[in-house]
Amino acid sequence: MPPDHALGSSRGGLTTKIHMLCDANGVPLRFLLSGVQASDISYAEPLLDDVCIPTSKRGRPRKRCRWLLADKGYDADALRRYCDRYRMQPVIPLLAMKRKPKPGLPRLFDRPKYRQRNVIERMFGWLKENRRVVTRFDKLAKSYGAMVSLACVMRCLRHLFQTQKATEATRA
């Protein structure tokens, strides 16, 4: 497949993997498309590099998050070093494979914090309610990315209007 298609073959046929980053409220911040056979870890750093995290305060948006919650597919020493370099706390479970013991203190795994990862899972569930995103009728990755962007904008607007309604209700 040409690289501009972002298609890969799996047991279910040709499909696309969406690598997504969202905030604690499930609002999508950035996404990348790849073929299914591409590993998750190879898209982690490019995904984190160009993100802008909105804040409620004035000024520039933040470039880095405080916590990085990810599944076992993102367990790699390179990503953990990347998190250390930018002062992010990785909350990633270790792979079941036995590794050589590393010198120094072992990394602690924050299980209660990891349970918050269901926010991204629920966001993907909501995203897959959009038939056009699930079935991928588009040939080019650019067209498919536009549909995913549109779904993400709808999600952002939905979150924005829900928070505005909540603040108006508390004022009244």
Image (spheres, rainbow, N blue to C red):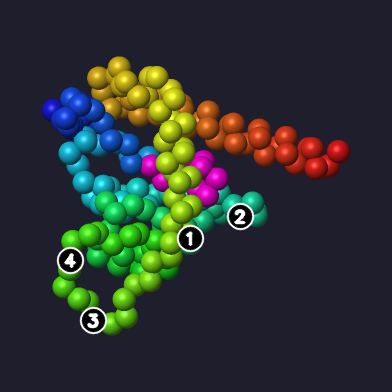
User: Of circles 3 and 4, which is in front?
Assistant: 4
Residue indicated by mark 2: 59
Residue 97 lies in the magenta-colored region: no
Task: Work out whether mark 1 precedes mark 3 in sequence or the reverse, and give the earlier one.
Answer: 3
Query: Hey, what amino acid is under mark 3?
Result: Pro
- What is the magenta range? 20-30
Pointers 1 and 2 in contact (CB under 8 A)? no
Q: Earlier in the sequence, mark 1 or mark 4?
A: 4
Q: CA distance from mark 1 to mark 4?
A: 24 Å
Q: Residue furthest top?
A: 137
Seen in the image, is 61 located left or right of residue 87? right
Tag 1 near tag 4, CB within 8 Å: no
Q: Nearer the viewer, mark 1 or mark 2?
A: 1
Residue drawn at 37 percent across, 24 percent down? 133
SS of the residue under disc 1: helix
Above-or-below relation of 56 to 130: below
Residue at screen point 83% across, 42% down: 171
Q: Earlier along the polypeptide chain: callout 1 or callout 2?
A: 2
Q: Which residue is mark 3?
A: 103
Position of residue 35 relative to residue 118, above or below, is: above
Query: In the image, what residue occupies the spot 31% across and 21% down?
Result: 136
Dot 4, how many residues are within 10 Å of its Cα: few (below 14), some (14-19), or many (20+)? few
- The alpha-carbon separation of the residues under discs 1 and 3 comes to 26 Å
Name of the residue lying farthest toward the left: 1
Residue type beneath disc 4? Lys
Residue 112 marker: 1
Q: Which residue is mark 4?
A: 98
